[in-house]
Amino acid sequence: MKRYCYPKLTPFIELGNLRIGGPGLANCLFVVTRAYIETRTTGCVMLAPAWLKLSIGPMLRRERDKRVYAGLFNRIGIGGIRKLLLTSPLNPRRKHIVKFSSLGNYFSDFNRHRHLVAELLGLITKPSTIALVDEKRMSRGVAMHVRLGDYNDTLRIPTEWYAGVARNIRRINPSIPIFLFSDGTDDELRPLTTLPGVERIFCGNAFADMQAISRCLFTVASDSTFSAWGAFMGGKPILFSRRHFPAVYCGDVAEAVIGNSTELPPEFVEILEKAR
């Protein structure tokens, strides 16, 4: 009897490729990647993720990216009517469906399967989704991700921390561009965008921004899995003020959590010096 891996991306209603609510793109990627690794290592059959999301918050906050994820990805696995029939409560074969809905142990589950993560990303990525990503340009700069929109003051990293890190980056390498990715408003980000060498970037959608981050020299991250996915996709170093989830890497790529300090660790200084 066939086994099926079902990445269920919402605890609420899911109809084919449409879901009501549920997590954002970064956390969905954990669920889908865990299911995909299971299919590739055990031979079970993948059910297509329901990427398309009805989400009110980003619209009310007037964010650039409304986080509906419409048309961003190629479909992998069984979808449409067949998926609906397989997941129906009336289908006795539902007992052969392995459901994935948690984040697992974050990136710790993926480090020994990086080739499968890359394989998955290659399968789902539409060229049109990442058409605005200038990979060559991104490769010459540092990514800075500032999570604001749906984070309250206790979750946000202070803008002053990012500004201090940006100044130190430019002190070490005055010509290095800093590419700022954020869901914040222009007013909220003005303390950063007015700094020399800092440029706000938006590549049209959340996944394209992750792709752009993945091409940068390293990432100055928020306490967000979005930052971490961007770095992980490219196997690039990452710097946090704080991090509420386990380490992104297993010690083979530079990663640091520096608290309130804005001084860069030696391995990040070395990257900047080599980029002169």
Image (cartoon, helix red, strand yellow):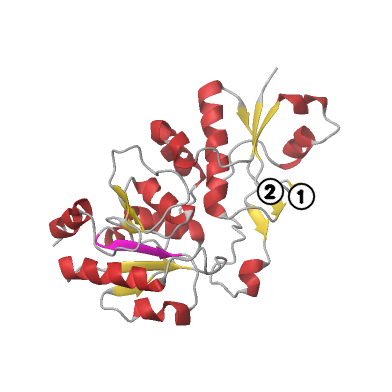
Do the CB atoms of the residues marked 2 and 1 lie less than 8 Å apart? Answer: yes
Residue in the picture at 76% in, 35% down? 87
Q: For the magenta stretch, what is the residue range?
A: 140-146
Picture quadrant of residue 200? bottom left
As shown in the figure, which amino acid type bears the numbered disc 1? Ile
Residue in the picture at 55% in, 67% down? 65
Residue in the picture at 14% in, 56% down? 274
- Residue reaching furthest top? 1
Give the SS element for disc 1: loop
As shown in the figure, which amino acid type bears the numbered disc 2? Thr
* Residue matched to label 1: 13
* Residue matched to label 2: 10
Give the overall secondary structure of the magenta segment: strand
Instruction: Judge by depth and name the residue closer to the eye, 36 or 197.
Output: 197
Instruction: Judge by depth and name the residue closer to the eye, 162 or 56.
Output: 162
The number of numbered discs placed on residues in the rendered structure image is 2
- Residue reaching furthest right? 90
Q: Position of residue 76 (x, y in %)?
A: 58, 39
Tell whether position 157 is magenta. no
Q: Quadrant of the N terminus?
A: top right
Tell whether position 145 is magenta. yes
How far apart marks 2 and 1 lie (CA) works out to: 7 Å
Residue in the picture at 24% in, 59% down? 264
Q: Is 229 located above or below residue 179 in the figure?
A: above
- Mark seen at residue 232: none
Q: Position of residue 217 (x, y in %)?
A: 27, 56
